[in-house]
Image: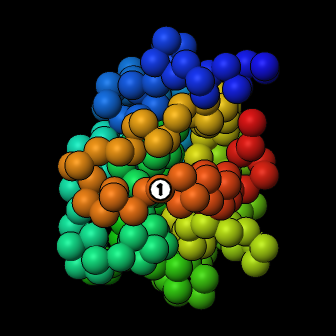
Amino acid sequence: MNRREFLQLFPFIFLPPRSEELLGKRRPKLDKFGFRPKAGEAFRDMQADARKDGIHIYPVSTYRDFWHQLRIWNKKYRKYGDVQKVIEYTAIPGTSRHHWGTEVDLIDPRIKLRDPLSSQYFESGPFSELYLWLKKNAKKYGFYEVYDKRPERKGFKWEPWHWSFSEESVPCLKQFLYLDLKIHLKDPEILGSENFDQEFLTKYKQDYILGINPKLMP
Ligand SMILES: [Zn+2]
């Protein structure tokens, strides 16, 4: 039996110590902007250098805890009544990378839009200059686009606004993969969770949690 199989059999005994943090149920150490300190430092360096190139970067969303994600999820589930529709853009509470303090959704704050996190605005609209700058420069600061535009990528739709600080998010993902989703997502608070059977969860893990930029894979 390998370590992974062992953990699957005895998840309660051998929960990784940071599991509560990874599930958004305990706050990691964060700066006032909702980043882990190292990610925050790198972000501010990137933001300052972008400014020198005339690019304004504003973080609209960084850390979100489980209950915040739960409110987003349940609101969408009430609207659509269909898990497949909700997971186009929204992670199941407990599985959002925003629980880790390593992620950020970015916009240009000078442009006021009702629903700024839309890929059309980044592709050729008002945030295209910002997006091009990020594509070229973000890696110098350790940030990578998570749900990129490769046609072969499955899972969440293209999210050109969502960037991840790889140095800290890769270890988070590595530990997260040891968690047994069947146990953690069977939560009556999560609307629609009765649909999370083994087949669904296997696919969710493979296509959604691992349907990311290869630069962010453990
Ligand atoms: Zn995001």
For residue 172, side relative to residue 70 (left or right): right
Q: Nearer the viewer, residue 95 or 191?
A: 191
Q: Closest to the observer: 142 or 109?
A: 142
Whether residue 39 is visible to the viewer of this picture, yes or no, is no
Compared to residue 50, the image places residue 11 above or below, namely above
What colouring style does the render use?
Answer: rainbow
Residue nearest the viewer, comparing 117 with 157: 157
Q: Quadrant of the C terminus?
A: top right
Going 58% across and 58% down the picture, which residue do you hit? 199
Q: Which class describes the residues within 10 Å of circle 1: few (<14), some (14-19), or many (20+)?
A: few
Visible in this render: residue 185? yes
Where in the figure is residue 42, as x and y percent of width and height? Answer: 58, 35
Q: Is residue 82 above or below residue 147?
A: below
Identify residue for label 1: 197
At which x and y percent is residue 95?
46, 46
Quarter of the image that includes the N terminus? top right
Q: Is residue 139 above or below residue 195?
A: above
Q: Is mark 1 within 8 Å of ligand 1?
A: no
Which residue is pictured at 29% across the width and 80% down the height?
Answer: 80
| Residue at horizontal 67 percent and vertical 55 percent from the top | 206
x then y, percent, for residue 79 = 23, 78
> Regarding mark 1 in the picture, which secondary structure is present there?
loop
In the rendered structure, which amino acid carries the disc numbered 1?
Answer: Asp
Residue at the image position 67 percent from the left and 19 percent from the top: 6
The image shows a total of numbered marks equal to 1
Above or below for 134 versus 85: above
Q: Quadrant of residue 3?
A: top right
Q: Compare residues 135 and 203 and report the one nearer the observer.
A: 203
In the image, residue 131 lies at what x, y percent? 61, 69
